[in-house]
Amino acid sequence: MFIFFASFLMYLLLVWSGSGIPMIEVVIGLLMATVVTFAYKTWHPEKRLSKRGLDPRRWFGFVAYLFGPFALGLAKANIDVAKRVITGKIRPGIVKVTPALKSDVARTLLADSITLTPGTLTVDIDDAGAFYIHWLYVEDENPSEEQLYGNFAHWARRLAE
Amino acid sequence: MAFFILVIAALLVSVFFNSLGAVSLYRFPDVYTRLHGATKCTTFGTIFIAVAVVLYAVGRLLESGENRFWVLIIHTLVAMMVLLVTNATGAHAIARASHRSGLAPAKAVVDRLEESCSRGGASQ
């Protein structure tokens, strides 16, 4: 259900031109959202259309995460990588970490967060839910979750599981 | 006026990080480390371009009160969200494809993925 509303809202946001939205655009938006939803359903028949993604508390939580801890981590890590680009001091390697996340959405959220904060890059994930992360400066060959990405896993669990 | 000083500041930050992204392509040894610089410094830089656009639009909105600046703000925010998602996914796809086609990370001190692949572990 979430994907339907997300694509519909996205369409309306893109056609809105400062004064009202003509009826024909709303109809086209509904049509497009239906097509997208059915296409998604065809690719992933095992996924049920759930109402969980529509919970507004999740949305507020997501926005709070995006502008709070995530933005902070992004800024800190970017300055760190900028220093490494200039000094050329790197010690790369691929480390393994296993956060206890079960749902696909939570894993995707965490993997995207890890990839967006520079210095860490998710390379692969296996069936058991272990993340293989390319790290620009390996401090520890068997790192803890805290060292790699702070409290992102905690947030992913809260928002998407 | 204060807004336009902020716009210029944001643009300077974005130019700095975007050029670091380009520099990192020359400084770093292999595809994974280059991806760090090339995709993420540019993400940060491009976010600041978006911030500059939003600040500019807010400044003009307060000045004139025209609705079209709201449209500019919303479209920029949508573009920023899409950029965050696609950039992370693209970087991950490139990294995963290179590792699966057998490209080992250069100068790596540890490669857990290679170890578990040769044990027959992580295979998807």
Image: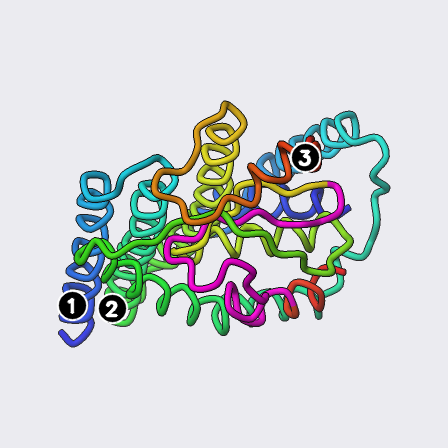
Give the alpha-carbon distance from disc 3 to disc 2, as whole Å: 59 Å
Question: How many neighbours does mark 1 have within 10 angstroms: few (below 14), some (14-19), or many (20 or more)?
Answer: some
**Which residue carries the number 2 mark?**
B59
Kindly identify the amino acid type of the residue bearing the numbered disc 2.
Answer: Gly
Task: Please state which of the two labelled residues, at mark 3 or mark 2, is closer to the viewer.
Answer: 3
**Could you tell me which secondary element the residue under label 3 belongs to?**
loop
Give the alpha-carbon distance from disc 1 to disc 2, as whole Å: 8 Å
Identify the subunit bearing mark 3. B
Identify the subunit bearing mark 2. B
Q: Which of the colour schemes (rainbow, by chain, secondary structure, one colour) is used?
A: rainbow
Callout 1 touching callout 2 (CB < 8 Å): yes
Same chain, labels 3 and 1:
yes
Identify which residue, B91 or B76, lies in the foreground.
Answer: B91
Question: How many neighbours does mark 2 have within 10 angstroms: few (below 14), some (14-19), or many (20 or more)?
Answer: some
Task: Please state which of the two labelled residues, at mark 1 or mark 2, is closer to the viewer.
Answer: 1
Residue at (64%, 39%) from the top-left corner? Answer: B116
The residues colored magenta run A127-153
- Report which quarter residue A161 is drawn in: bottom right
Residue at (36%, 69%) from the top-left corner? Answer: A76
Position of residue B77 relative to residue B65, above or below, is above
Where residue A26 is drawn, which disc sits there?
Answer: none
Rendering coords of residue A15 (x, y %): 48, 41
- Report which quarter residue A158 is drawn in: bottom right
**Could you tell me which secondary element the residue under label 2 belongs to?**
helix
Left or right, B101 with respect to A60, comes to left
Position of residue B63 relative to residue A132, above or below, is below
Where residue B119 is drawn, which disc sits there?
Answer: 3
Pick whichever of labels 1 and 2 is earlier in the sequence. 1
**Which residue carries the number 1 mark?**
B4
Residue at (36%, 47%) from the top-left corner? Answer: B36
Identify which residue, B33 or B110, lies in the foreground.
Answer: B110
Position of residue B54 relative to residue A42, above or below, is below
